[in-house]
Amino acid sequence: MIERLDKVEERYKEIQEKLSTDEVIQDVKKTTELSKELSSLEDVVNAYNEYKTILNGITEAKEMENDKELGEFAKEELERLMPLKEEKEGELEILLIPKDPNDEKNVIVEIRGAAGGDEANIFAGDLFDMYTKYAESKGWSYEVTNEEKGTSGGFSQIEFIIKGTGAYSRLKYESGAHRVQRVPVTETQGRVHTSTATVLVMPEAEELDFDLDMNEVRIDITRSSGCGGQGVNTTDSAVRLTHIPTGIVVYSQTERSQIKNKEKAIKILKTRLYDLKQREKEEKEGAERRSKIGTGDRSEKIRTYNFPQNRLTDHRINFTLMQLDRVMLGKLDEVIDALIAEDQKRKLENSVI
């Protein structure tokens, strides 16, 4: 572990020196890349410096152990420092786990009502409320890019961007099929029904991540179909983009301005293509994907929301919480923290420190 920490510290100092050179200062792209890398190494370097201070303290205390006057003090120091050493080693092991380069990014979330008809759409709306309340509790903002409302409430599909530092690091475990068990508002006999909504979470692609060739994109301008006021419904402002090589289609209609809808659609298309690129890379790497918490696929059943029993169960890590009412109000941290802890545990088991 020490050898790896020395290399991280060496790289940290190397980046600091590069950032002060004229060549890098004049290259915005390179400056951005190096600044991000520097920031990603900072926590490791700071923790390593604290660890070295602890080790020096232990060495000094051991040298004083046999001293008649300072022996008792040295013993007390060792009793204080040894647990700190173990604690810091555990912290460093976690910090040395390779970081997901997308963790600090904004996210694009798509929720669809799946099996269960109207109730599935209503549940999709409940999930949208849950995630946006969670975003607000974190001081993040959100913006709807496309929505198709259900006939009895909720959404057959809704797509939105959550903007905030670290949004992807917290929400990336949410992709998959979410199952709800409850008595629907449309049920007259009081029977519990099971319905499903699917969630897809993608890191928002940045300019440095993906170059989109607009010659490979077909642009169609249509009349907006959603509810959004008179302006939306009477102007040809909705934009549909089709990426010809992959067949990926995105749609944006929430803005009255065609230009703004086009900007949003391009951002979403870049994100979908970047996500596709990342998944292809993970498939090649294989082992890393198998060690993850879930596959990130929309079809994977990840969680059950049992309303009669006020119970949430995450099937990937066998985690149960008897506080579903709080979760639906956006109190997701306990669930997400459990997922992160298990993810770190699995990565530690699959890594060589």
Image (cartoon, rainbow, N blue to C red):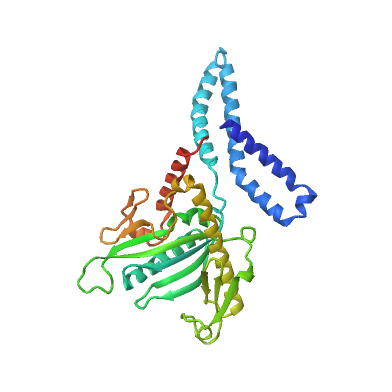
Q: Residue at x 51, y 23 (%)?
A: 76
Tell me residue 259's x, y (percent): 61, 77
Query: Viewer-proximal residue, 131 or 344?
Result: 344
Percent position of residue 294, x then y: 42, 52
- Outermost residue toward the right? 22
Report how many numbered discs are placed on residues in the image.
0
- 320 horizontally vs 350: left or right: left
Q: Quadrant of residue 300?
A: bottom left
Asked if residue 241 lies left or right of residue 154, the reply is: right
Position of residue 113 in the picture relative to residue 58 (left or right)? left
Percent of width and height locating residue 240: 54, 75
Write down the quadrant of residue 53 in the picture.
top right
Q: Is residue 70 visible?
A: no
Residue 285 drawn above or below residue 165:
above
Residue 163 in the image: state x and y as whole percent: 54, 62
In this orientation, which residue lies closer to the viewer: 198 or 52? 198
Vertical comparison of 259 with 78: above or below = below
